[in-house]
Image (cartoon, rainbow, N blue to C red):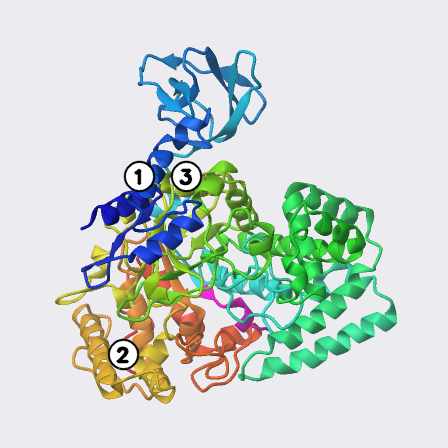
Amino acid sequence: MTEARELLQRLAYAYGVQPSYRGHDGHEYPVSDETLVAVLAALGCHVEPDGTAGLQTALERRRLEPWRRVLPETTVARGGSETSVQVRVPHGSAVTLDVVLEDGSQRTLEQLEDFTEPQQVNGDLIGQATFRVPKDLPLGWHRLVARLDDTPDVEATLVVTPERLDTADSFRTRRGWGLSVQLYSTRSSASWGVGDFRDLAELAVQTAAHGGDYVLSNPLHATTPEPPVVSSPYSPSTRRYTNPMYLRIEDLPEYAMLSPRRRVLVDEMAAARRRDNLSADALDRDAVYAAKLRALRWLHRVAPSPERAAAYQAYREEEGPGLDDFALWCALRAAYAADDPLWQDPGLVPGGALAERFRSDLAEEIDFYRWLQWLCDDQRASAQSAALDAGMRLGLMQDLAVGADRNNADAWVLQDQLVASMSVGAPPDMYNQRGQDWSQSPWHPQRLAETGYRAYRDMLRSVLRQAGGVRVDHILGLFRLWWVPVGKPPTEGAYVTYDHEAMIGILALEAQRAGAVVVGEDLGTFEPWVQDYLAQRGLLGTSILWFEQLDDGPRPPQDYRVQCLSSVNTHDLPPTAGYLAGTHVDLRERLGLLTDPQRERERAAEERDVFLRALQNSGFYPAGAQPDLTDPADVADVVVALHRYLAQAPSMLHGVALVDAVGEQRIQNQPGTQQDEYPNWEIPLADAQGRPVLIDDLDAVPGFARLLDAVDRELRGAAESHAEDHHRHGHS
């Protein structure tokens, strides 16, 4: 290795950039100099890969960075544990350090005897003083204040996080289960063609009637303010705010206050859209969203009651400038396309002169988009209340996407905290040999710390405020993310690390305050210690039946993790009925995604047979019986057996996919395809025969109650264990 390469690698490590990574095959792969230079530049360090002197200078500059600040940008402590904080001041200067708590009270911190050699910084000799942060500080967001003679006070954020999140502890003694759904696809006879918040509430009540404790939905994050919209709920415009497409118009008090003529028009639009509920063809989000927005604009003009006006004002005050900036972006984006040259104007940034002019000129439009978010928050709250009133222990569980589309709201509102020149993705693995590019801008680690993690905190608060739990997609991204320079293939990326003590600690703090359980999707390639760390902090992991395999067969359910949400499948996989029948292989062959379809079909059959034998060996399916996987009844038998088998796992939470309960076979998202090839994220709920299934009819679907009740009985340890649920095979 050349001296320049060694220096470049040391510089990368200093900025949290990993110069190599371990692939899914266990091999170590180096990151190219070109990529390291590009990622370092995105982090504010501009160097030439072969400039030895420049690299040495950059390393020294990085080493001295903490000495140029009086206080660390953000200090993260754990409640009940003592830590320390370093204060850097001119050598020999007197300094005291106070902590101002959230409640306004103040404490002076004790200085420790801890001599550190002073450092020369820009010709000045800078010394260091160390102060004790006591272990009895309350959890929360506090301020450190350094007081020096003859200079202004210096402040920085101190956040005290829980040593361990305890919100899931009750599930250790009594395990819980819930239903996972794609809300847009889960409709009722009253839906406008896509599922909505009222549907979510009614589904929660039905699930609770069978013993369920939660309903996990797809991410409900906001999309673009006007059609056309992006179909994928995992590529939102922002993660902080909610998609108004999920509003139930008729549940809004303003609907009843419309003029008779307007109300007739709204009812006519609703009736036109409801006709789609009877079709199993691809959903038409754009038509639904356009119709709802038209109705909502009429409702926005209705004078609110004093109570509604006060509630709206309280919501605005609680959300603060973040809501105002998001609503401003919505108004601008509704008027100007993403590629309009106006967006390049240097004054069109939050707080910029042009942005402030538009804030005045578009005041009514801005209020409309702000008001929509209040409506969403209110209907989410109603759905959560309905779930808890029905007896659920958690209620709604929100899904938090990895990031937001890098050309939309978050990219504009948070442009000083996101890295526009980079895109988040994943390195090559066995399923995606070219890697993945998710077209989402990553957080800038330094900017997060400099701003006290406020944007991250505010996003978490909005997601958690009407929920009993949150599933964090790709929670490994709170430890490190694969950054890909924009315009380069995903293979030319690098991992950039984050302060996981801050990212996980703040997540735990906000979840603790919201009383919410956190489930981390920790599948994929990760360093071995990560799962242990998450468990120590009280977060649950994720286990998927199909992925839990050992060299000699499936992992026995009894060996699954306790602190975990276990399920047979996930939204990234075909419904279990489709998996068993091999329809996912047929689809990929039809789309030309397989190089050797026959081998893939054989591999799928082998995996299926391995699990069937496991069911037979454990007594959940008759020994020697061979199901006819073209027969929906036989398939349903195996689906129930798989869920009962998995219910033997000691995992605190279990998940049942709604698609498995109704016999759906179609996959919701087929990776590697475009919308003109496959209707990704547009598949409405249907049964084994391809007929649309509405929430109103769920209890009449034979498999729905059967599967839910079977899981509930297994988790409750019913005495009849393997004898219940009789059917034509004499097993369940």
Whether label 2 touches label 3, CB < 8 Å: no
Residue shown at 38%/19% (left/top)? 128
Query: Which mark is nearer the camera, 2 or 3?
Result: 3
Say which amino acid is labelled 3: Ala
| Residue 366 in sight here | yes
| Residue 305 is inside the magenta segment | no
In the structure shown, which secondary structural element does the residue marked by tag 3 occupy? helix
Q: Is residue 174 visible?
A: no
Task: Please report contact status of discs 3 and 1: CB closer than 8 Å, yes or no.
Answer: no
Kind of residue at badge 1: Gln
CA neighbours of label 2 inside 10 A, class few (<14), some (14 to 19), many (20+): few
The CA span between labels 3 and 1 is 30 Å
442 or 167, nearer to the observer: 442
From the top left corner, tell me how far across and down residue 285 is, in percent.
Answer: 60, 74
Q: What whole-number distance in Å separates the C-alpha atoms at marks 2 and 1?
A: 75 Å
What are the residue bounds of the magenta stretch? 180-189
Q: Position of residue 600 (x, y in %)?
A: 25, 82
User: Which disc number belongs to residue 730?
Assistant: 2
Q: Amino acid at mark 2?
A: Gly
Task: Please tell me whether mark 3 or mark 1 is closer to you in this view.
Answer: 1
Of helix, strand and loop, which one carries label 1? helix
Q: Which mark is residue 56?
A: 1
Q: Which percent across, then down, holds residue 504?
A: 40, 43
